[in-house]
Image: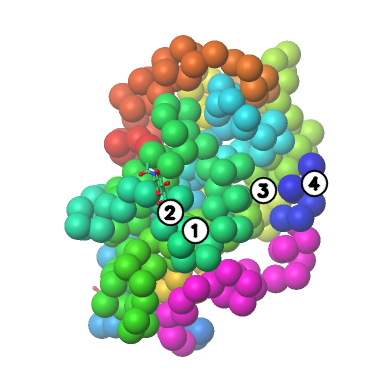
């Protein structure tokens, strides 16, 4: 509860998000104009892909509702990642193996991003391995595909891996603007083994909370399991403005009978985690949504 309160306070202090992030935590700045073209909304060709995300200009902030991860907050969804889709919904992955950094903790600590690291340790958890493995995977698979994070776009003298540090800071910054749990709870949709919900009510609650934007929710055995919030981007992933849009994929949950199980207590055993992880890797994102190698 205390954590959510400080998140809410941060949003109050920084209606635009970006300014605060760069003042308090931003270690590098993009130098991009604040009024440049918006990814996937440009009407003419844009050549400077350091300040205009291309081709992956449709960006998904993905979250999990994992019930079986030890220590996971009972009152928050957790971070999956920040994925750059192309404007038509196709996407690229694993764009630069030479930048597949593995020791993310070390990278964040050595470049002063300890508050981001602290937040990640609480809200970016893996149900099938260590959190750091998930962070490294998300960077390698998705983070290396951002044009605005190309090393050649960084200020001269930036330390090696500074673009990955900026990625992790931005994932946290965007996630903090999307309190899925709270928006559902505000509409009376809370984890409850004895309840089922209608998809229209789930989406209505999230549209209401987000100021009118439709996300795509995913279910696993008719139980809420994941959500994707969609954005375009004005400027750089480092410090640009994320402009929310409606999901371009449909939700994969049934129209009614949706379960929302409470998280298990933190003493759950590892065998259920491994089983879930194996299932996730082989599963697709569901009806109407493209398959994607998960995690
Ligand atoms: C937007 O910019 C990209 C990159 O320059 C370009 O390929 C695309 O055609 C542009 N879109 C429009 C509608 O001009
Ligand atoms: C990451 O780096 C830290 C500090 O250099 C080191 O203590 C730790 O063992 C490293 N972890 C991995 C998984 O390489």
Q: Is residue 101 magenta?
A: no
At 46% from the left and 76% from the top, the residue drawn is 28
Does any atom of ligand 2 lie closer than 8 Å to the CB of label 1? Answer: yes
Q: Position of residue 42 (x, y in %)?
A: 37, 77
Marks 2 and 3 sit apart, C-alpha to C-alpha, by 28 Å
Q: Residues within 10 Å of mark 3 (few under 14, many from 20)?
A: some
Mark 1 residue crowding within 10 angstroms, few (<14) / some (14–19) / many (20+): some
| Label 2 to label 4: alpha-carbon separation | 27 Å
Q: Nearer the viewer, mark 1 or mark 4?
A: 1
Q: Earlier in the sequence, mark 2 or mark 3?
A: 2
Tell me if I can see residue 183 in this picture. Answer: yes
- The reply to whether dot 1 and dot 2 touch (C-beta < 8 Å) is yes
Q: For this rendering, which residue is in front, 200 or 12?
A: 12
Query: Quick check: 16 above or below 219?
Result: below
Count of marks placed on residues: 4
In the picture, which quadrant includes the C terminus? top left
Mark 4 = which residue?
2
Q: Quadrant of residue 46?
A: bottom left
Q: Where does label 1 land, which residue? A: 109
Q: What residue sits right under mark 2 in the picture?
A: 106
């Amino acid at each position: 509860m205390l954590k959510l309160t400080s998140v809410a306070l941060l949003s109050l202090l920084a209606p635009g998000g970006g300014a605060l992030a760069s003042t308090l935590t931003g270690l590098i700045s993009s130098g991009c104009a604040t009024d440049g073209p918006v990814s996937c909304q440009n009407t003419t060709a844009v050549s400077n892909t350091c300040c205009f995300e291309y081709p992956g200009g449709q960006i998904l902030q993905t979250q999990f509702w994992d019930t079986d991860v030890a220590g996971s907050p009972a009152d928050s969804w957790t971070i999956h990642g920040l994925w750059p889709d192309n404007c038509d919904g196709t996407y690229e992955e694993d764009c630069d193996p030479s930048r597949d950094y593995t020791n993310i903790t070390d990278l964040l600590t050595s470049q002063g991003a300890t508050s981001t690291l602290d937040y990640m340790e609480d809200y970016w958890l893996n149900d099938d391995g260590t959190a750091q493995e998930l962070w490294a995977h998300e960077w390698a698979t998705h983070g290396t595909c951002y044009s605005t994070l190309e090393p050649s776009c960084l200020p001269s003298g930036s330390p090696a891996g500074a673009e990955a540090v900026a990625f992790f800071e931005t994932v946290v910054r965007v996630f903090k603007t999307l309190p899925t749990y709270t928006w559902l709870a505000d509409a009376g949709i809370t984890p409850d083994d004895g309840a089922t919900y209608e998809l229209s009510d789930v989406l209505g609650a999230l549209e209401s909370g987000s100021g009118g934007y439709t996300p795509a929710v995913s279910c696993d055995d008719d139980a809420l399991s994941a959500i994707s919030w969609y954005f375009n981007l004005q400027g750089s992933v480092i410090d640009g403005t994320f402009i929310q849009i409606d999901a371009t994929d449909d939700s994969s949950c049934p129209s009614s009978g949706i379960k929302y199980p409470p998280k298990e207590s933190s003493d759950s055993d590892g065998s259920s985690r491994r089983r879930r992880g194996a299932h996730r890797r082989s599963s697709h994102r569901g009806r109407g949504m493209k398959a994607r190698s998960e995690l």
